[in-house]
Image: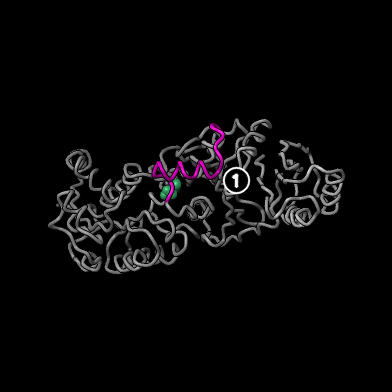
Amino acid sequence: MAIKIGLVGTGTVGCGFINILQKHHDDFVRHYGLDLEIVRVCSHSDTRAKDLGLGDRFTPDFHDIINDPEIDIVVELIGGTTDARDLIVGALSAGKHVVTANKALMASDGKEIMDLADQMHRNIAFEASVGGGIPIIEPMKHMLISNEIEQVKGIVNGTTNYMLTRMDQNDLTYEQALHEAQDEGFAEADPTADVDGLDAAAKIAILSSIAFNSRVTMGQVYAEGIRRISPIDLATARDMGYCVKLLAIGNRTPKGIDVRVHPTMLPLEHPLASVNGVDNAIYVVGDYVGQTMFFGEGAGSGPAASSVMGDVMETARLVKNNVQPLVGCTCTDSLPVVPMEDLLMRYYIRFVVMDTPGVLAAMAEVFAKHKVSVRSVIQRGHEASGSVDMVYVTHTAREKDVRDVLTDIQNLDDVLAPKCPPTVIRVDQ
Ligand code: HSE
């Protein structure tokens, strides 16, 4: 008997999903005994459904899918947090299983949605919400459960990784790299969610919730993007044996969960350092497994649809065997999120200053006043205007103290802020 699917959304991922099923339907029947059938397709327009031969199953109203008693699995690929939320809540309430790629919704309303799924004994699967085609949520929920996860950190935004790679390897400015990413179709016309780290923040909220068995919402994640990074930072980092990546980081600490997104200096020998371009990778450390890394294409039609289809197949097995989901919400602890101000790290800080006598001494005084110990100072460049870049690398310092240093130094004469605000990059290890 066919397992009936209602698909909502015929954008990039929705079309990829239809393509996979058209190509592999018979293989799924032969190998796994799963006969999947898309019985309804919902979208704003019927163009794509018609192009893909599903025009006769088109509806513009997702309620037709929620209310269709023969549908077993609803696939939500519209994104956003309003209609998508109504659809998912409506579908679960109507007793349907749900597969979604919606990171923003799962990172904000994950608890409510998973509680509802548990209550209804239905599956909610969201592998494609993090890392596109990379299997990471299911491996963490299944094969890694014998571990206490100590750390999950990754490059989970392809747009910014592409931009940083181009800035590093081809000396492009931030603006040039952004335009190129937009021309290539990686970055949106409004790139805010990517370049300000918000997309990565949603993803690390989801990963941390699973890794640490404790709910982390997107609003709890400190997020800082890459707008202030320039090629000089990448070159200076490289001279020191580091690359710069926008990392999404979750750590289990004695005080709670340390979760954040920011540009990070990563030693060149770290496994994540060689992940370039639009690729994503997630590095997970468990107490028994040690280090693992999951690598692949983090976005795009094929990779994201591959994850969605994987979730649909797993869910179809439940339907076929008439069994309830084996794994629901695993957030059984309520660990606090550690305040960012308490973070202890080494910091790279670049100020643009006028090359005048006394400026270095004045800056040194501020570091000393806030008890931030400087490990090295490098002066780079010399503009015709008389300005230079002063790069400080600190010993391990407290975030709060470093913020005080930044505020005080920006108020000094001859420090070119706010026109050239300082660049801060936290140093990993
Ligand atoms: N905008 C994301 C990225 C893809 O650039 O990786 C969707 O999650």
Q: Is residue 165 above or below residue 214?
A: above
Q: Nearer the viewer, residue 389 or 244?
A: 389
Q: Secondary structure at mark 1?
A: strand
Q: Quadrant of the C terminus?
A: top right
Q: Main secondary structure of the magenta part?
A: helix
Q: Which residue is mark 1?
A: 263
Q: Given the image, on which type of amino acid does mark 1 rest?
A: Pro
Percent x, y of residue 382? 73, 37
**Residue placed farthest to the front in the image?**
384
Query: Would residue 206 appear left or right of 347 to someone viewing this image?
Result: left
- Magenta stretch encompasses residue 208: no
Binning the other alpha carbons within 10 Å of mark 1 as few (below 14), some (14 to 19) or many (20 upward) gives many
Residue at (60, 51) in percent of width and height: 252
**Residue placed farthest to the left in the image?**
56
Percent x, y of residue 255? 66, 56
Residue 207 appears in the rendering: no
Corner quadrant of residue 374: top right
Corner quadrant of residue 383: top right
